[in-house]
Image (spheres, helix red, strand yellow):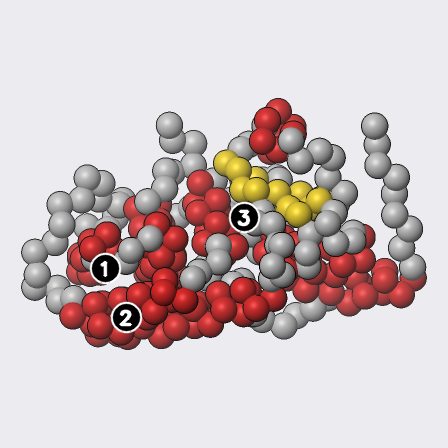
């Protein structure tokens, strides 16, 4: 059974065209938590959701990437489903849509302001079961150790899985800034300072998200799926037919490093998976 199409006015279409042309930097809510490749503007997703659906309707993004659609659907009072074959995308989107309690925010601020500044590179590093590709190179080796030491503090210093995942996303954000395509790798002091600043910026975005949510807001359903398997996912089937699909599908023949960074002269590393604690796309 097909759902009937909703009519849209010329004024609404003009608003969507304006959103398509929006050139403003991505900002607000939790949209800046991680620079996921091929993101589209939140204002475009917001305009489509507001003009083509009503509160309570179901919005689907089968190539959700960094979660722009599900964040905008959530704050607009719509139910939503996000799916992606990349586990890193699911991780980032989940952090973006997860509400933090005040106690969790306080512990994260303390971690950033007190614990991370105490990390020193002369301390023994944890024995990692996986060393990310090309992170043994001279330009990146010290940063790998600093990141490893920061991640090693999470279980002891942060009380909940949500707060630990949030902190991993902070390190992911700062690691991308420090490593991906950089001609000069920042110093340990710069890295620690960036952790503190980024944590507080992300906590502000999280608070903004919470303030926009109603008491009965439904958290999006996030699934790791190939887009071809979305229709066969039983949890997705329980939601029924989608009222709107808002997505940015892959571009045929275009090579985008969705899950890798480039370090030390464009050498690829899978460090994002190591930091986020997720599996590389396609790995079992």
Pinpoint residue 39: horizontal percent, then vertical percent: 57, 56
**Frontmost residue, 110 versus 8:** 110
Tell me the element at label 2. helix
| Secondary structure category for the residue under label 1 | helix
> Is 126 or 105 nearer to us in this picture?
105
Q: Residues within 10 Å of mark 3 (few under 14, many from 20)?
A: many
Q: Is residue 164 visible?
A: yes
- The label nearer to you, 3 versus 2, is 2
Q: Which residue is mark 3?
A: 65
- Identified at 38% across, 31% down, the residue is 283
Q: Which residue lies under the disc numbered 1?
A: 157
**What residue sits right under mark 2 in the picture?**
110
Q: Can you give x and y, in whole percent of width and height, for residue 224 in the image? A: 50, 36
Q: Earlier in the sequence, mark 1 or mark 2?
A: 2
Q: Residue at x 68, y 59 (%)?
A: 76
Task: Classify residue 218 as left or right of residue 167.
Answer: right
Residue 261: percent from left, percent from top: 38, 52
Q: Reading the chain from its start, which is encountered first: label 3 or label 1? A: 3
Q: CA distance from mark 3 to mark 1?
A: 30 Å
Above or below, 96 relative to 188: above
Q: Please name the residue shown 62% across and 54% down the image.
A: 216
Q: Are the residues at dot 1 and dot 2 in contact (C-beta closer than 8 Å)?
A: yes
- Look at the image and tell me in which quarter the C terminus lies: top left
Left or right, 98 with respect to 166, comes to: right
Numbered disc 3: secondary structure? loop
Across and down, in percent, residue 188 comes to 20, 69
């Amino acid at each position: 059974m097909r759902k009937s199409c909703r009519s849209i006015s010329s004024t609404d279409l003009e608003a969507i065209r304006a959103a398509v042309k929006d050139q403003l930097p991505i900002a607000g809510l939790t949209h800046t938590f991680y620079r996921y490749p091929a993101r589209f503007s939140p204002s475009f997703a917001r305009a489509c959701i507001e003009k083509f659906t009503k509160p309570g309707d179901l919005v689907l993004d089968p190539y959700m990437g960094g979660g722009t659609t599900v964040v905008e659907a959530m704050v607009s009072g719509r139910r939503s489903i996000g799916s992606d074959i990349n586990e890193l995308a699911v991780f980032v989107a989940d952090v973006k849509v997860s509400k933090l309690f005040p106690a969790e925010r306080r512990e994260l601020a303390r971690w950033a302001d007190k614990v991370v500044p105490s990390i020193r590179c002369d301390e023994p590093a944890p024995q990692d079961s996986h060393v990310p590709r090309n992170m043994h190179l001279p330009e990146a080796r010290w940063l790998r150790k600093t990141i490893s030491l920061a991640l090693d503090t999470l279980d002891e210093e942060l009380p909940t899985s949500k707060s630990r995942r949030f902190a991993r996303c902070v390190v992911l954000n700062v690691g991308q800034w420090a490593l991906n395509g950089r001609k000069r790798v920042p110093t340990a002091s710069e890295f620690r300072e960036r952790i503190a600043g980024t944590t507080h910026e992300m906590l502000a975005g999280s608070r903004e998200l919470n303030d926009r949510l109603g008491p009965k807001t439904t958290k999006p359903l996030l699934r790791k799926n190939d887009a071809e398997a979305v229709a066969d996912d039983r949890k997705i089937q329980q939601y029924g037919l989608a009222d709107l699909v808002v997505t940015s599908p892959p571009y045929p023949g275009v090579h985008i490093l969705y899950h890798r960074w480039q370090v030390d002269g464009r050498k690829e590393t899978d460090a994002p998976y190591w930091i986020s604690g997720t599996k590389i796309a396609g790995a079992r």
